[in-house]
Image (cartoon, rainbow, N blue to C red):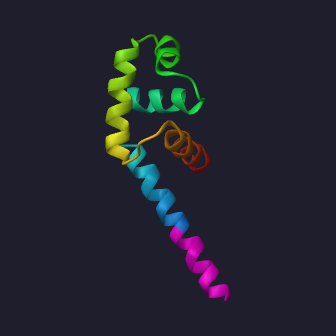
């Protein structure tokens, strides 16, 4: 049993590293948008926070979701949580 637990932990660590590597391929602005949206704010509020338009946030959000293979703001928040835990 302990060997299986160690194997699962190893897989989890590997998955987290892959996520972090993938996140690091995002542009600086895409990362900023991800961090802003992870706070649960709207695209409009994220735009105001970052000094860009809501439409620009939507474009960056779409790009980061496509690159990270995610679809929702909840998934963005989970992604950012993993990134922050690994840094």
The x and y percentages for residue 28 are 39, 29
Count every numbered label the image shows and give the total: 0
Reply above or below: 18 against 39.
below
Residue for point 36% across, 48% down: 69
Where residue 84 sits in the image (x, y, percent)? 59, 43
Question: Which residue is nearer to you in this view: 74 or 51?
Answer: 74
Residue depicted at x 48% and y 65%: 14
Res 80 quadrant in image = top right
For the stretch drawn in magenta, the main secondary structure is helix
* Position above or below: 3 against 9: below
Q: Is residue 9 magenta?
A: yes
Q: Is residue 35 above or below residue 84?
A: above
The part of the image, by quadrant, that contains residue 74 is top right
Q: Residue 39: horizontal and vertical position, in percent?
A: 60, 29
What residue is shown at x 46% (from left), y 15% (from top)?
47
The residue at the point 53 percent across, 26 percent down is 36
- What is the magenta range? 1-11
- Quarter containing the N terminus: bottom right
Q: Judge whether residue 66 is colored magenta.
A: no
């Amino acid at each position: 049993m302990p060997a299986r637990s160690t194997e699962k932990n190893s897989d989890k660590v590997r998955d987290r590293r892959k996520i972090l590597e993938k996140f690091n391929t995002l542009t600086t602005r895409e990362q900023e948008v991800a961090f802003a949206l992870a706070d649960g704010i709207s695209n409009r509020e994220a735009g105001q926070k970052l000094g860009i338009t809501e439409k620009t946030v939507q474009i960056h959000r779409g790009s980061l979701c496509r690159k990270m293979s995610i679809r929702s703001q909840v998934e963005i928040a989970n992604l950012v949580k993993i990134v922050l835990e690994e840094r």
